[in-house]
Amino acid sequence: MMANTNLYQSLSLIVPEIVLTVVLLVLVLTDLIFHKDKKLIPYVALAGILLTGYFILNQFGEKGFAFQPALYTYGMVAIDSFGVFFKMIVVVATIFIIFFSFGSEEIIKIKDRIGEYYALIFGMVLGMFFMISATDLILIYLSMELMSLSSYVLSGFTKLRERNSEAALKYLLYGAISSGLMLFGISLIYGLTGSTNLYVINSLIQNPHINLFTVAFASILIFAGIGYKISSAPFHFWTPDVYEGAPITITAFLSVASKAAGFALLIRFIRTTFISYADANGMWQMINVFDWKTLLIAISILTMTLGNFSALWQNNMKRMLAYSSIAHAGYLLLGLVVLSNQGLLAILIYFSVYLIMNLGAFLVVMLIANKIGSEDIHDYNGLGITSPFLGVSLAIFLVSLTGLPPTAGFIGKLYLFIALVDAKMIAVAVIALLNSVVSLYYYIRVLKHMFLTKPEKETQTITTSLPNTILVSVLVAAILVFGIYFAPLVDAATSCLVMLGL
């Protein structure tokens, strides 16, 4: 009876994941039943993700564990406001991707396989949800594989170009290597502690007789698996090729939702396993078994520098945004580098902003590619003059990605720099600032082509449908409004930390 009660309680805590699974099955059945007319499928997907979002919001403020062993205070899945925040990032990204798919020429051309397309997206989302909440190494690995297998297929799903298949193959090969490294690291931790639960591992590695070399080596291997998901250097090599070859909708989804799930996992892994407590100033006191601070500083600087400098000579817009995404992973790691509650707050705020500006940039690139059939920067010559709405919108998104006021991107970077200054990491802050200056060049280069360079041939005027116009306008408005009135973002992020007791 006790076991049944525990099971029912656990299932009640993972209602959003259960809803996602049911919607996934409904999508497959809808695809089978209405195989001749599949117009209903996107609306089923949209209704399903909205319903999932509703149940996630209902969990805000809750704190507990699902699948919790008897007499223990921990479980395999943590339910808390931190998880709710990142799951909502994934849900919002998914809603936008569904709307993007309505207007994507690439997705319209594969309408016969649209059921599989949405089923795979929901498979990815389900994997992300468990990644965000998992507190057990086995569940972490399984959720990463669930997300990865769906994303491998989606990256080459359209088969419209050779680049699609190349992207999927490279993604699969790099993913297999990173998964293998992570699994090796997990096996070492299990062999050392006899447990896969992060809370149990936390207590066991505080033993003064623990083998420090093995813990450090295993930690690096596990970080390699997570670093692959967040596109941090030196695990970023797959990103430009996959982003360029995959459909734009999937590229946008990977750049935001996959990265959010990866960062949530990395933060929970470090904070649960290697932190003994947070002091009165909110600084995390590390267990002295592995120097995470030095590793994260090195990875963060390497990631943002490689991302920004590699983006300088990219002519393909998707590749440029891919390297930009790598650079932003470096910036986001800065919030974790300080190992404090202030840094965690900065990450939450930055991700909220990053979601809007990155999806907006990819949306405009998609709408332009729909009309001109190209993602080359030279084909953008004069586009800002002939198609001012898209030109100005893309300019706003790129300025926000740079981190200039009065856009929301400035607020995201401001809180990161505040966290670094509070932690007295001035040198790291200066390096990050110089990297932002470098990024200004390749973002402004796009604006130069759109507004200052005369086209070699007559540029066609790109008109957008009313739904796409509304979608772009909503994202632009959010960038400008949150750039001036950012209190709601800060309040939401602060509330999550307060609910966690931080």
Image: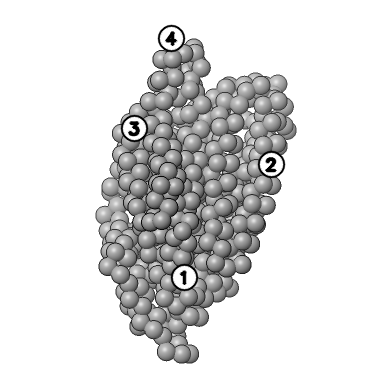
Q: Taking 393 as reference, is 151 above or below it? A: above
Sequence-wise, the earlier of marks 1 and 4 is 4
Q: Which of 481 and 466 is in front in this view?
A: 466
**Residue at the image position 39 percent from the left and 21 percent from the top:** 9
Residue matched to label 3: 59
Residue 206 visible? The answer is no
Is 217 situated left or right of 359 in this image?
right
Quarter of the figure with residue 290 = top right
Q: Is mark 4 on a helix, strand or loop?
A: loop
Which comes sooner in the sequence, label 2 or label 1?
2
Counting residues from the N terminus, which is met first, the one under dot 3 or under dot 1?
3
Which comes before the other along the chain, label 3 or label 2? 3
Decide if residue 497 is on the left or right side of residue 337.
left
* Quadrant in which residue 187 is drawn: top right
Q: Which of 379 and 7 is in front in this view?
A: 7
- In the image, residue 401 above or below residue 5: below
Q: Earlier in the sequence, mark 2 or mark 4?
A: 4
Report how far apart the C-alphas of labels 3 and 2 lie in the structure.
Answer: 34 Å
- 89 over 366 or under it: above or below: above
Task: Give the number of marks.
Answer: 4
Amino acid marked by disc 4: Met
- The residue at which mark 1 appears reads as 443
> What is the C-alpha distance between the residues marked 3 and 1?
39 Å
Does the rendering let one see residue 277? yes
Q: Mark 4 points at which residue?
A: 1
Q: Which amino acid does label 3 sit on?
A: Gln
Of badges 4 and 3, the one in the foreground is 4
For marks 4 and 3, the one nearer the N-term is 4
| Residue 380 x %, y % | 45, 79
